[in-house]
Image (cartoon, rainbow, N blue to C red):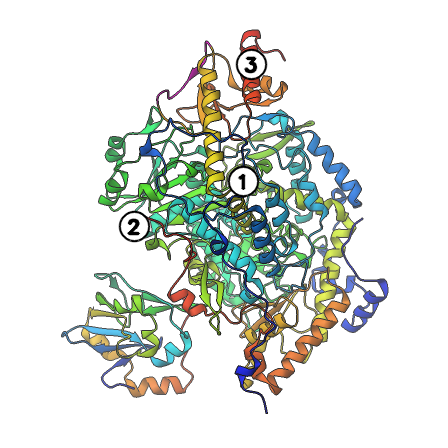
Amino acid sequence: MADFIPHTPEETQEMLRLVGVASLEDLTRQYPSAQTFPELPLAGPGMTERELLAEMELWGRQNAGSSRAVVFRGAGSYEHFIPEAVHSLTSRGEFLTSYTPYQPEASQGLLQAIFEFQTAISRLYGMDLSNASLYDGATAAAEACLVAVRHTGRSVLLVSEGLDPAVVSVIRTYTTGLGVSMRTVPLSEGRTRAEELRNLLSSDVAAFIGSIPTFWGTVEDFSGFREMLSGQGALFILHANPHSLAILRTPGEWGADIATGEGQPLGVPMSGGGPYLGLMTASRAFMRKIPGRLVGQTTDQEGRRAYVLTLQAREQHIRREKANSNICSNETLLSIGATIYLALMGPRGLVEAASASHQNAMKLKKGFSEIPGVRVLHEGVPHFHEFVVELPIDARSFSLSLLERGYLGGLPLAGVGRIGGENRMLWCATEVRTDAEIGGVLAAVKEILAGGNRR
Amino acid sequence: MPENRRYTRTHEWMAPSDTPEQWNVGITDFAQKEVTDVVFVELPKVGRQVPRGGEAAIIESVKAAFSIYAPVGGTILGVNQELESDPGLLNRDPYGKGWIFRFRPDHSADVQSLMDGPAYETFLKEGGGHPEHG
Amino acid sequence: MSEPSEKRESASRPEMEPSIWEISRPGARGVRPVSRPVDVTDLPPGICRQTPSGLPELSELETIRHFTRLSQLSRGVDTHFYPLGSCTMKYNPKVMDRVVSLPGFADLHPLTDEEGMQGFLGALWTFSELLKEVLGMDAVTLAPAAGAHGELTGILLARKYFESRGEAFRTEILVPDSAHGTNPASAAMGGFTVRTIASKASGHIDLEALSASLSERTALVMITAPSTLGLFEEELSEVVRKVKAAGALLYMDGANMNAFLGVLRPGDLGFDIVHINTHKTLATPHGGGGPGSGPVGVREFLSPFLPNPRIVRSGKKYSVVDGEDSIGRIRSFHGSAGVLLRALAYMRMLGEEGLKRVSLYALLNANYLRKKLEGVLPGMGDGLCTHEFVLSARSLEKEGVRAVDLAKGLLDAGYYAPTIYFPLIVPEALMVEPTECESRAMLDRFADDLIRLVGLAASDPDRLHRAPEKTPVSRPDEVKAAREPVLVDPLAAPVRR
């Protein structure tokens, strides 16, 4: 049994004496005695480090991680190259085991790292400013919608069909009970038509939220959207993959008011789905309206550069029920990891990685388009690093066949919105995929289609 | 304490503005001391109607937020834009340049129900309440 | 006679680290992600980025040094005693870091077919079962990414529950004035009106105030147990009775669970919903402000409404399902698995006895430290405290010394300061939570140092006003930071819009 309690029996006795109780159990007399010390059989006898690792290893071995199945699946979580230094630097105890920098003088390093994160992310998104992180991309998108509702006093949200359905689901949950309704702006051939948006725009609309790239992998042309929306007094929100912004037109360049994103591609391992990193950027006009912590640069009593948490009067510990959000803890360690990732990669590294992702995905897409019986959707529309294919057979069992051959193939899209379907899959290739792997998975696809499902 | 003003138990003052039927509202010196350095003022929307005691504005310090209430029911007709670029004005000149908003009471008679200068001074001496946190 | 302040300008302050944009210079490169870079020529320029990102350019070694030095300018539990009240800054066992980097965890895609995720789903399911047992609840969701996220989840659960019973007229949530700000903020996010219940002077819930606020419009009453003052509600059973009689649900904010982990179960106490902060009670690292996680336990009748997706077990097989009556998704994927697995590891290592010892020693350390500080500063409550206690620095007002000055003095003495100015109902509050992981020697040292600083308030208050003197900066101008916010580095290129 592990413990982490440093007291010797003698120390314990002396301390009990000073406190004036006879035993440790006596300290619990302030609790209702009928309920104290329940039996906890599931908790077990405790373990040593070795026993624990052995048990956890057993769980781990039953999972098809990237070392066992080559990853061709994205849909919101991506396998990217993560430089070793990200892990080693974020494992440093001063970062890992510190807490919110309420005492700025003792936390200047942490505050500066977060400040550099805010700067880097705002620049990546082409926006004026960024907060210090939210829980994940989906909750960030939801919070952005709430900002729009509060700011405009309106109750309708126009949500692009290009937004990840899981993100849409979170927006729906977050707007429950607030009298807000959501309307879908459909895609045609993977893109939003300006007329569709115009038809749905009214003076009730708080915001339109679109996606860069779309969940289906296509890249939209948002020309004219900003003018259309601000003409009606509605906000323009864009939810963007930060990896893609190395080469795609940024939310800032499109004129977004608020831009959110999932920061997992920036140095965060896939980790079975979390913890991830919510990004929120905005134009200066929304500085006091956005949720989340903000680090500001200032000076101290003697004029030295110093960093502090600022604009805290928006937050829960001060405004309480009138706060911009209830968020307190966020994803600081991952935001520092993202900053380290961005610094190690640099602008050129980011462009190289994003370009390689795109090229690899296009190779894979071309390979699919050459397989008889397989149709690649949204032909002729620009894609970033994901695309949808339609197979002649059920995608779910197809996926299992691929897994048996050592590939985590595209995501089966049964029941996933109008563009999904039982025979459809969302495929992804990032910069880490090699030509051999791409060739290998295409060969496996052909083999399965030719020989039927060999299970 | 400047003449011709009325005061509330929540430390707002009202003074006649240059326009008849319209009054300026701000907070007293006692209140600005309690707030300490003002960093931001959330001003009301012009045209808004507020009931008596309704929250009209919010004053932020580094560590707290304070509600400013309409002394009597009325319509907001103007706000002090200078506070946007210089919130410290509220601390430096709470009775003059640090006014917050101008409004027209629904019933001018209501104004008389508020405390006058001497009554407010007495209220403070008797331990009159601290400004509420917003 | 004391020296003029200019002479005392300390030469011993550590240097601040330059901004990364100061080190950056055009053309410098760090890692290379691919061996043969390619150009993208097939995307129309109209949808491509035109303005440079302005991200910093530096070599790998420069990046390593920069962030290593930044870490050295911070303090963590690994380096300092961190008695932040209500944060439970306990030791984060290093073996937990190893656990999440085992093959099959860090490198697992969240949407892997179920057949390829049985170990992952099984581990999380096991963790849920353990939490059910320790919380005394019938069902658990692992989805919330933090305590506040758990609160919002619990509130949305209550909403859906009452809707399903035709009681949507329950639009109010009651919160004591001693509550953490997240409680009322979460209630408002959930679309409820918040009513604040005044506490008694002792810091306990005022039962009369509670009765006066309870009505058929009450959906939920949120209690922190023990309270934010480190006191266990002596009349909790009465609170439970009143809340149930009004037809409302009772929520427990579990931020302070380190006070009775393994010793008391919220379910046994009468709570309907409870959240636990794994980054507090279950020793997952705080990370400078996250990631954490806030699993929520509920009674059976609330189980149908839990967030999607859920992990269920049938025989030896684990599956992922969506519930028909669920409140929906509250985040992407399952949850902060990397954090949850660490918490599972912690509970498995401790076992039943270890879990109990956590609370017993948390109680011992807090009561011991409080006893050592008796008479130094007034505190709240007589008799025993739980895992934390509150002191007030109000008594030092006449010397012009405030809680913040003591906190800064403690920074110089080599600690992280306790929580200050919370809870709001105690003036000049210092909230001290030592946790079970600190040695007696550390507690003795801390007590001695705090006593010395309180003594300085009388003999040399200016010394305290000048603190901290050993940190790189001292008393940053927070007013300026709020009036003229500088939220991006002025050295980074401005964004061209």
Q: Nearer the viewer, residue A105 or C352?
A: A105
Report the predominant secondary structure element of the magenta stretch.
loop
* Chain of residue at mark 3: A
As measured in the structure, the alpha-carbon distance from the residue carrying label 3 to the one carrying label 2 is 53 Å
Where is mark 3, residue-wise?
A443
* Chain of residue at mark 1: C
As measured in the structure, the alpha-carbon distance from the residue carrying label 1 to the one carrying label 2 is 31 Å
Bounds of the magenta span? A372-380
Q: Where residue A421 appears, x then y in whole percent? A: 44, 20
Q: Are marks 3 and 2 in contact (CB under 8 Å)?
A: no
Where is mark 2, residue-wise?
A152
Rendering quarter of residue A86? top right
Quarter of the C terminus of chain A within the rendering:
top right
Residue type beneath disc 2: Thr
* Marks 3 and 2, the one that precedes in the sequence: 2
- Above or below residue A319? Residue C97 is above
